[in-house]
């Protein structure tokens, strides 16, 4: 891991969300980024979410990926408590297959952004976090170029 690389937190609203968030963890590992996995709920454990988000920078994190379904407030609540980049992964399920989670994640008020990927797009969320870190790490940028070249083959 390069000297500039920071950990990436992968949060999910429920332990049941882990299979959908697993691709983010695998992608971060593939690129040598230390990932920290946490089950925190915007509705069931709001105090813990606020505490985690407000101390994440001091804990060595460079970005936070949040996966949640249905009301999907996790990414927004995290973004309200940190100035780190927050990447939301709306998760499928519920009555309308994740579209509710997509809207809840992407429709943030001005001043509290959440970068949002596709429904169940955990791997892309990890790649976005990696790209953010590659701005300051040449070796990570080279790994991304190689990854994309392999994907084009």
Image (spheres, rainbow, N blue to C red):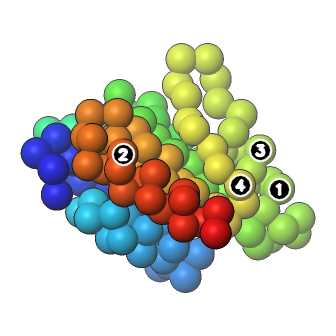
Task: Please identify, in this view, whether the residue under mark 2 or under mark 4 is nearer the observer.
Answer: 2
Q: Is residue 129 above or below residue 96?
A: above
Residue that mark 2 sits on? 141
Q: Tell me, yes or no, if residue 42 can be seen here.
A: no
Taking the spot 43% from the left edge, 53% from the top edge, the residue there is 144
Left or right of 84: which side holds 122? right
Q: Is residue 144 left or right of residue 101?
A: left
Asked where in the image residue 79 lies, by quadrant, the reply is top left
Could you tell which of marks 4 and 1 lies nearer the N-terminus?
1
Q: Local crowd at mark 4 within 10 Å, few (<14), some, or many (≥20)?
A: some
Q: Residue at label 3?
A: 103
Provide the residue designation for mark 4.
Answer: 118
Marks 2, 3: nearer the viewer: 2
Q: Is residue 20 above or below residue 120?
A: below
Image spot of residue 6 (x, y percent): 22, 47
| Residue that mark 1 sits on | 99
Residue at 57%, 38% (x, y): give it.
115
Is disc 2 placed on a helix, strand or loop? helix
Q: Spatial distance from mark 2 to mark 3, Cα to Cα?
A: 31 Å
Q: Mark 1 or mark 2, which has the lower sequence index? A: 1
Q: Are marks 3 and 1 in contact (CB under 8 Å)?
A: yes
Residue 120 in the image: x percent, y percent? 67, 66
Measure how far apart labels 3 and 1 are at the Cα level: 6 Å
**Residues under labels 2 and 4: Cα distance?**
23 Å
Mark 2 closeness class: few <14, some 14–19, many ≥20 residues within 10 Å = some
- In space, the residues marked 4 and 3 are separated at their CA atoms by 11 Å
Q: Which callout, 2 or 3, points at the residue further toward the start of the chain? A: 3
Mark found first going from the N terminus, 4 or 3: 3
Badge 3: residue crowd in 10 Å (few <14, some 14–19, many ≥20): some
């Amino acid at each position: 891991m390069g000297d500039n690389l920071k950990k990436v937190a992968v949060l999910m609203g429920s332990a049941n969300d882990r299979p959908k968030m697993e691709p983010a963890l695998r992608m971060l590992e593939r690129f040598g980024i230390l990932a920290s996995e946490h089950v925190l709920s915007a509705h069931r454990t709001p105090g813990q979410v606020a505490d985690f988000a407000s101390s994440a920078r001091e804990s060595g994190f460079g970005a936070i990926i949040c996966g949640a379904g249905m009301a999907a407030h996790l990414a927004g609540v995290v973004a309200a408590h940190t100035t780190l980049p927050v990447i939301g992964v709306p998760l499928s399920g519920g009555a309308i297959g994740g579209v509710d989670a997509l809207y809840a994640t992407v429709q943030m008020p001005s001043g509290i952004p959440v970068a949002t990927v596709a429904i169940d797009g955990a791997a892309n969320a990890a790649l976005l976090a990696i790209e953010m870190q590659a701005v300051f790490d040449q070796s990570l940028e080279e790994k991304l170029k190689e990854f994309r070249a392999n994907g084009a083959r």
